[in-house]
Amino acid sequence: MGFVISAIVIGGGLLWILIRSLQGKDVDRRVVFTFIGITVCLAVLFQLKFGESATPIVKAAFDKIEQLPAGSKIVISYDFDPAMAPEVHPMANAFVRHALAKKHKIYFFSLWATGQSLLEVTVQDILKKEFPDARYGIDYCNMGYKAGNEGVLNVVITDIRKMYPGDVNGTPLDSLPMMADVKSLKDMDLLISIGGGKPGVKEWVLFAGDRGGIPTAGGAAAVSTPLLYPYYPRQLVGLLGGTKGAAEYESELIKRYPQFANIDTPALQMMGPQTMAHVVIVAFIIIGNVSYFRSRRKKVTNG
């Protein structure tokens, strides 16, 4: 019903704008902005959702985690701030859910100071609530934030303990069972960086993945994703781009793991308003072009 009401309102509005354009009347830009605002509000109000399926670049990241044997060591680095969180935090949560469902061990890092606090949100809202049996030091550990950008990676690629004598709480790494056979990042089976700035996915590829021959995947804000495409598939095994990439991963996770059918899926929810807004923008482009060519033809006909 919500979709029908939205279609009637939006379709009627677009038809009115098309008629005014064909009549040679200008459409004020404020009308356009208001119309897009109404479209987004309707999608949010009726919680419109559209089907998503993983594209090859997203599915490659999913399949990499899927194919690793249980107990594999995965680094997940929170390299983002609250401004990027709406886009990339859903990716981080999906990666954590997937890795723990496959019984992998997660080593949390953060090259951004703000990433550490956002990681705590995942620990409290996802890890402790949905995976109460996961044990700290055995199934996951938090290395915390370290200043130094690429310099941190230059050190931990050969010896983690030189940069991290203890975890985020100061607990010596040697007292954590999951660190017993880990000396450096080269002992990891997969690196995942989630962010959209510097340091981020690119730095993890260049200073850790490439140097150590470690498979690396990433998730990035939409504005940064195009800069990372050249690294796929040789240096990045998979990449999630913006809300769309996060929604595709959430969709694949729900499809493959029925126990996640009722989890909160913010990326999928955000795709409804985004899709509707894009449809309206495309419609405006078409209307503008129709109006332009019609007026030009009229001028030619009238001499």
Image (tube, helix red, strand yellow):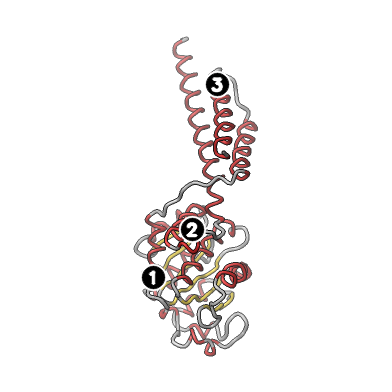
Q: Between tags 1 and 2, which lies in front?
A: 2
Gap in angstroms between the C-alphas marked 3 and 2 = 41 Å
| Label drawn at residue 215 | 1
**Along the viewing direction, whichever of 173 and 146 lies nearer the viewer:** 173
Name the residue carrying label 3.
19
Secondary-structure class at tag 2: helix
Gap in angstroms between the C-alphas marked 3 and 1 = 55 Å
Report the residue that reaches farthest toward the left. Answer: 234
Q: Between tags 3 and 1, which lies in front?
A: 3
| Label drawn at residue 250 | 2
| Label drawn at residue 67 | none
Q: Residue at position x 44%, y 14% from top?
A: 300
In the picture, measured across the screen, residue 223 lies left or right of residue 256, that is right
Q: Position of residue 127 (x, y in %)?
A: 56, 71
Please identify the quadrant where the N terminus is shown. Answer: top right
Q: Residue at position x 50%, y 32% from top?
A: 285
Q: Quadrant of residue 125?
A: bottom right
Say which amino acid is labelled 1: Pro
- Where 43 falls versus 24 (above or below)? below
Say which amino acid is labelled 2: Glu
**Along the viewing direction, whichever of 113 and 246 lies nearer the viewer:** 246
Q: Residue at position x 50%, y 33% from top?
A: 283
